[in-house]
């Protein structure tokens, strides 16, 4: 394949990725859960108040998004720009990794096109979560490791360690990748005697891989009295969910990986890894570094009951993306027997991936109505420092309105921040509405979702309905003019 054709096809892949991304946003797909808004507000409160919404979320995303919001204050757009950039970055790194593995432009092009239509990459590039950033850095780490396997230049091994180290600050799965990588290097250096790097360089690698996990454990011990507080707190959150044995199995990373990669035919990559690793030591090593963390996560989820609270497919997505270069190899090298056969499997891939993507994006948990409600509040004098909004919080999706309003500090929670740990009500439907309390708290607008609150407020002449936005209604508190 000529360079001109190669780069033209790459440009087409990037163009298609951008078009698909825009189509999802234009059609109102903004979130897969309330976590997107929670992560955004966590970063916003950290950068403005040195506060945070969760003490178990790792800090990388908080720091990245918080500083980005200092550059441009838009709580809706900025997080989605970050996800988009990393999503496009994943496409570029997949091409690089495929070239390092196989040194064939044709396979790299197939990998690029498969990555463009791969369901989890599309969804995670649209919504502002940590997964697409985690996937990007995991891919960088494996790319530099394979480059080191090819060149034996120690700088590549150190860079692989840098990127594995970064993943430990993004998601806890990164700790397992880094731990397995370190054990693998220890084995190769001190037992197999295959690693020809200096002791100083090895110590540097250990520091890069272990520094943050050690800091986080010590910080939890000093701050919360338990080095594993983050683990027990996470387990406690999951215990709120009723868990059957079937749900435990279905939500496990192993089940999610097998099911979704079977349905997209990406499981062919696992077949390719098995076949190639018989003769290719680099692929064999990569399969170990991919596989052991996968099995550890599956075991932790099964025996620790650490189920994802939503969208369990996203945990398995990193391993699905790592399969893409190998699926591309299988399609190009093992299946490219005739153009007619090749076109048939290409069409099958597109149909299956398109169907799976639509399933993942079947409902946006940040609705157009919530976005419009927030924008309405932003437009109605929210810039005045004394104004406050009282918002009902029957579930976590009230966070979406706070994000869309661009002024989350203006909000008061009717029953406390956490919907599942209610506190004393400001507006209580069983008592007379306290007009004086509303004035003391400088409340100008009330944002309600439940019919009982809406019916309750409609009784009072000093509460005026402004507008309905789907399930949400916005009311204005008519204050008495001071004489």
Image (tube, rainbow, N blue to C red):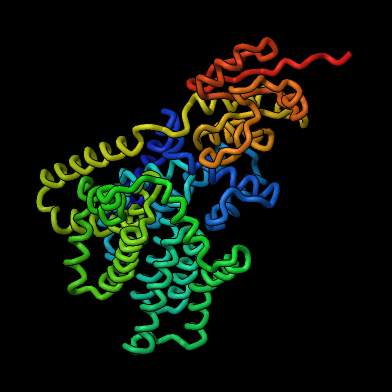
Q: Residue at x 59, y 22 (%)?
A: 429
Left/right of residue 100 with respect to residue 397 in the rendered view: left
* Residue sitting nearer the eye, 47 or 357: 47
> Looking at the picture, does residue 363 appear above or below residue 223?
above
* Residue sitting nearer the eye, 316 or 473: 473
Q: Residue at x 73, y 29 (%)?
A: 383
Residue closest to the far top = 461
Residue 475: quadrant of the picture: top right
Q: Residue 416: horizontal and vertical position, in percent?
A: 61, 38
Q: Residue 334: horizontal and vertical position, in percent?
A: 14, 58
For the C terminus, the quadrant is: top right
For the N terminus, the quadrant is: bottom left
Left/right of residue 68 with respect to residue 305 in the rendered view: right
* Residue sitting nearer the eye, 378 or 250: 250
Residue closest to the far front = 430
Residue 85 visible in image: yes
């Amino acid at each position: 394949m000529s360079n001109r054709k190669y780069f033209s096809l790459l440009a087409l892949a990037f163009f298609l990725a951008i078009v698909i991304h825009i189509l999802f946003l234009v059609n109102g797909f903004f979130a897969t859960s309330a976590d997107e808004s929670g992560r955004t507000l966590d970063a916003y409160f950290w950068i403005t108040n040195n506060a945070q919404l969760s003490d178990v979320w790792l800090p990388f995303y908080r720091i990245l998004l918080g500083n980005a919001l200092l550059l441009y204050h838009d709580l809706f757009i900025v997080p989605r720009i970050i996800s988009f950039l990393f999503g496009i970055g994943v496409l570029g790194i997949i091409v690089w990794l495929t070239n390092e593995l196989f040194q064939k432009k044709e396979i790299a092009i197939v990998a690029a096109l498969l990555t463009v239509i791969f369901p989890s990459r599309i969804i995670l590039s649209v919504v502002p979560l940590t997964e697409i950033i985690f996937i990007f850095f995991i891919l960088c780490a494996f790319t530099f490791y394979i480059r080191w396997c090819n060149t034996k230049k120690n700088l590549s091994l150190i860079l692989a360690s840098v990127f594995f180290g970064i993943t430990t600050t993004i998601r806890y799965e990164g700790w397992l990748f880094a731990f397995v990588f370190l054990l693998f290097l220890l084995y190769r250096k001190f037992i197999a005697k295959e690693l020809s790097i200096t002791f100083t360089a090895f110590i540097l690698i250990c520091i890069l891989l272990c520094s943050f996990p050690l800091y986080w454990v010590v910080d939890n011990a000093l701050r919360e009295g338990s080095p594993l507080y983050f683990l027990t707190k996470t387990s406690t959150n999951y215990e709120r969910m009723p868990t059957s044995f079937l749900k435990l199995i279905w939500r496990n990373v192993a089940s999610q990986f097998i099911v979704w990669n079977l349905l997209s035919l990406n499981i062919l990559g696992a077949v390719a890894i098995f076949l190639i690793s018989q003769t290719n030591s680099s692929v064999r090593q990569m399969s170990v570094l991919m596989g052991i963390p996968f099995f550890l996560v599956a075991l932790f989820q099964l025996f620790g009951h650490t189920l994802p609270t939503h969208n369990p497919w996203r945990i398995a997505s990193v391993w699905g993306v790592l399969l893409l270069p190998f699926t591309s190899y299988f399609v190009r090298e093992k299946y490219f027997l005739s153009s007619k056969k090749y076109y048939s499997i290409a069409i099958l891939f597109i149909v299956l991936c398109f169907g799976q993507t639509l399933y993942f994006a079947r409902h946006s948990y940040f609705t157009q109505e919530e976005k419009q409600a927030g924008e309405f509040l932003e437009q109605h004098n929210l810039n005045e420092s004394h104004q406050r909004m009282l918002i009902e919080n029957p579930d976590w999706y009230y966070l979406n309105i706070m994000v869309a309003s661009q002024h989350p500090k203006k909000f008061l929670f009717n029953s406390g921040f956490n919907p599942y740990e209610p506190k004393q009500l400001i507006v209580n439907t069983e008592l007379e509405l306290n007009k004086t309390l509303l004035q003391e708290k400088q409340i100008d607008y009330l944002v309600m979702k439940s019919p009982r609150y809406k019916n309750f407020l409609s009784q009072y002449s000093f509460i005026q309905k402004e507008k309905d936005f789907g399930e949400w209604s916005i009311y204005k508190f008519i204050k008495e003019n001071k004489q």
